[in-house]
Image: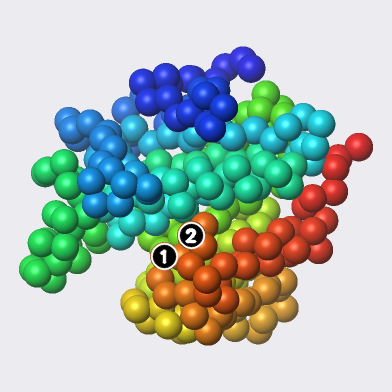
Amino acid sequence: MKNIILVFTFLVFTGTGIAQKVFTIWQGMVPGSENWTWHEQIDSTDIPNDPLAFNIVQPTLTFYPADPAMANGTSVIVCPGGSFCYLHIKTEGVDVAKWLNKKGVSAFVLKYRLVRSETGRPMKEKMERAKDTALSRKLVAQVVPLAIADAKQAILYLRKHADELDIAADKIGIMGFSAGGTLAAAGIFNYTIENRPDFAAPIYAYVPTALESTVLKDAPPLFIAAATDDEYHLVPMSINLYSKWLAAGRSAELHIYSKGGHGFGMNKLDQPSDTWIERFGDWLQVQGLLKKDK
């Protein structure tokens, strides 16, 4: 591949021990965070089986390519969630990417900018900070536009380098979980020809009304999933998003599971939400996104 900036500072390994390629998505200084001096870290203290990435300064895409023998040209940017304070990099990132690979879909796990953690325990720190609601909301509000910009830039980056990455420039989707779902949803309203996602999947997404605008005539097809017992009560946001697409005559599919809570991701919880990823695969098939390019 030519003209692609590779970053090997943080190598992500698959189960076979093969290093994944990591691409920076911004050229030079990242706009809006030029003065950030902290460094990306990983914490496995609070959830040993789901490492948390935090203090992201340089947004990147970690590439999980589909097997060339099965590749269909479709690609998905996967945005893990974590309250804009950290990223559930495994259960809402790497595990999703590997599942997509089995469908012939290439995946790119996005690490986007987050609220700074002053300690090495981002989850504990977030819980402590939540006691001061005003401060917590202020810090998140400051970083959300930066994270959304990272997601839009990620689409732009893939479209620009599609040929080099062996993906189709017109089959680039984005999916996200919780806070990552905010990024996926932001991309389906205000977009340009260059950064428009070809499809999107906000999963138990936080989609405030301030993020929404007019549903455009070429708004991308949506796959939406959430659980009724979501402890953050985000289901109405998913329903509202579906209703907007329905009213605009755009394609959308909605799954609201009776049980699953918030943050089910790729976890197997013995709950109805466990099968959401299979339904997403069905949807990709119906959309023609699993059909191999000639």
Residue 259 point in image, percent of width and height: 49, 80
Residue closest to the eye, 30 or 16: 16
Position of residue 18 measured from the top left corner of the image (x, y, whole percent): 55, 23
**Residue placed at 59% from the left, 83% from the top?**
243
Q: Vertical placement of 83 versus 228: above or below?
A: above
| Residue 33, x across and y down, in percent | 25, 38
Please state the horizontal and vertical placement of residue 249, each as a whole percent of the image.
72, 78
Q: Is residue 205 left or right of residue 171?
A: left
Judging by the rendered image, the residue that carries numbered circle 1 is 263
Quick one: quadrant of the C terminus?
A: top right
Question: Is 282 situated above or below 111?
Answer: below
Q: Residue 281, relative to residue 205: is it above or below?
A: above
C-alpha gap between disc 1 and disc 2: 9 Å
The crowd level at tag 2 (other Cα within 10 Å; few <14, some 14-19, many 20+) is some
Q: Quadrant of the N terminus?
A: top right
Mark 2 = which residue?
267
Q: Is residue 178 left or right of residue 200?
A: left
Residue at horizontal 47%, vertical 53%?
92
Q: Are marks 1 and 2 in contact (CB under 8 Å)?
A: yes
Report which quarter residue 278 is drawn in. bottom right
Which quadrant of the structure image shows residue 56?
top left
Q: Mark 1, mark 2: which one is toward the viewer?
A: 2
The reply to whether residue 232 is visible in this rendering is yes
Dot 2 amino acid type: Asn
